[in-house]
Amino acid sequence: MLVTEKSIKTLWVATTIGNLTDYTIRFANQPEGSKGSGHFEIVSLVGTVSVNGSHLHISLSDNKGQTIGGHLMPLCKVYTSAKIVLQATDRYEFSREKDGTTPWEELQVKDRTGG
């Protein structure tokens, strides 16, 4: 994985254009992912990526324009392309840690310059 090879600590998805034939996403407040097959346009992909933990959400529309979205899970299959524009910075470091406000690991942003 790119973030491991390059030791990237702070990267986020700026924009995405593409399509899938198979998806696995976890809907809100559900313990397991849901799967679907067909032809889907990626209408949104947002989130953070880091060696310290990643969190991505995706929205997909089907051939009738109906849209679903949720937490991106493994096993999604690209149909023709997925053009993902990423942005990174050395100033901040992203991590996912329990902070006591929820039972989940939440995004923590640390200023690496001390500013």
Image (cartoon, rainbow, N blue to C red):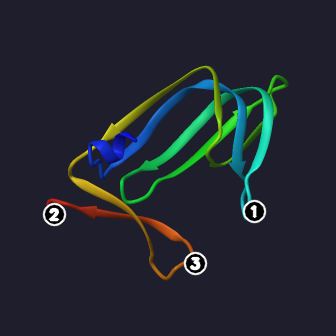
Residue located farthest toward the top when viewing the structure as drawn: 80
Q: Position of residue 100 (x, y in %)?
A: 49, 82
Question: Viewer-nearest of labels 2 and 1?
Answer: 1
* Side of 94 relative to 48 (left or right): left
Regarding mark 2 in the picture, which secondary structure is present there?
A: loop
* Residue tagged 1: 30
Q: Residues within 10 Å of mark 2 (few under 14, many from 20)?
A: few
Regarding mark 1 in the picture, which secondary structure is present there?
A: loop
* Side of 47 relative to 95 (left or right): right
Mark earlier in primary sequence (2, 1): 1
* Residue tagged 2: 115
Give the residue type at disc 3: Pro
Give the residue type at disc 1: Gln
Q: Badges 3 and 2: C-beta atoms under 8 Å apart?
A: no
Kindly indicate the quadrant of the structure image that contains residue 93. bottom left
**Which residue is depicted at the point 52% across and 30% down?**
16
Residue located farthest toward the bottom when viewing the structure as drawn: 100
Q: Badges 2 and 1: C-beta atoms under 8 Å apart?
A: no
Quarter the N terminus occupies? top left
Mark earlier in primary sequence (3, 1): 1
Q: Position of residue 103 (x, y in %)?
A: 58, 78
Regarding mark 3 in the picture, which secondary structure is present there?
A: loop
Q: Residues within 10 Å of mark 3 (few under 14, many from 20)?
A: few
